[in-house]
Image: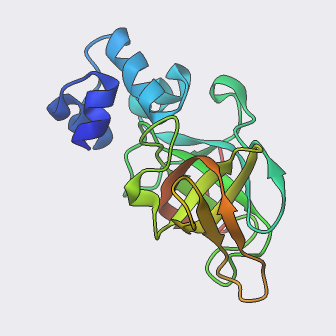
């Protein structure tokens, strides 16, 4: 978390308070920095920290076997929202809806995944070996287990469903570990 705070250009203590939903930024400049670091718009960030009933934006869909083009399709937080799970801070967290069945039986089509992008580009070490939301260089969004590929900069995207195909030696724009999974029945959409 200290690296994310440094990347945002804010103090670690301030960043930690924001992530835990305990305080708000002291000025708009800090809010812009933190929102950019999380890969969300300023509006999405502010709605999350200022709301008495915090919500999280659903930024689009992500493929689990289905080929889903760039899933961050809603501009400036204008898309649907979901009630923020109690275990997550609302600031900096976004959700995507799963399309497809390659991650069955753990994740099903229509379920929501919550994540935070620690940087705008790249694959952080925290995403390796974990189920992560990711985007390939050809603009497709996926939920897969991310593993190292045969060479630096290449990754294997592993499906949980034994009858689904895995992808090998794929270049990724970015990846973010899943923080929380909510079956579609639990999500309260706003």
Q: From where the camera sits, is residue 144 visible?
A: yes
Q: Is 86 positioned to the left or the right of 77 in the image?
A: left
Locate residue 55, reporting x and y percent: 52, 41
Locate residue 180, reporting x and y percent: 48, 62
Q: Nearer the viewer, residue 44 or 138?
A: 138
Q: Nearer the viewer, residue 79 or 164?
A: 164
Give the residue drawn at x 77%, y 45%: 138
Give the residue drawn at x 57%, y 66%: 149
The chosen color scheme is rainbow
Quarter in which the N terminus is drawn: top left
Q: Residue furthest bottom?
A: 162
Q: Is residue 173 above or below residue 130?
A: above
Q: Is 113 positioned to the left or the right of 51 in the image?
A: right
Give the residue drawn at x 69%, y 28%: 78
Quadrant for residue 3, please give it: top left
Q: Residue furthest left?
A: 13
Q: Is residue 67 above or below residue 189?
A: below
Locate residue 8, reporting x and y percent: 33, 26
């Amino acid at each position: 978390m200290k690296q994310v705070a440094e990347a945002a250009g804010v103090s670690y203590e301030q960043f930690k308070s924001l992530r835990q939903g305990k305080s708000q930024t002291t000025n708009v400049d800090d809010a812009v920095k933190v929102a950019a670091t999380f890969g969300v718009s300023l509006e999405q960030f502010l709605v999350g920290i200022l709301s008495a009933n915090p919500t999280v934006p659903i930024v689009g869909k992500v493929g689990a076997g289905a080929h889903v083009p760039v899933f961050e399709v809603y501009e400036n937080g204008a898309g649907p929202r979901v009630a923020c799970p109690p275990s997550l801070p609302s600031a900096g967290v976004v959700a995507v809806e799963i399309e497809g069945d390659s991650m069955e039986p753990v994740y099903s089509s229509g379920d929501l995944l919550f994540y935070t992008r620690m940087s705008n580009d790249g694959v952080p070490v925290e995403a390796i070996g974990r189920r992560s939301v990711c985007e390939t260089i050809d603009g497709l969004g996926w939920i897969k287990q991310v593993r190292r590929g045969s060479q630096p900069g290449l990754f294997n995207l592993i499906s949980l469903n034994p009858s689904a195909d895995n992808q090998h030696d794929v270049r990724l724009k970015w990846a973010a570990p899943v923080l929380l999974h909510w079956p579609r029945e639990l999500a309260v959409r706003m």
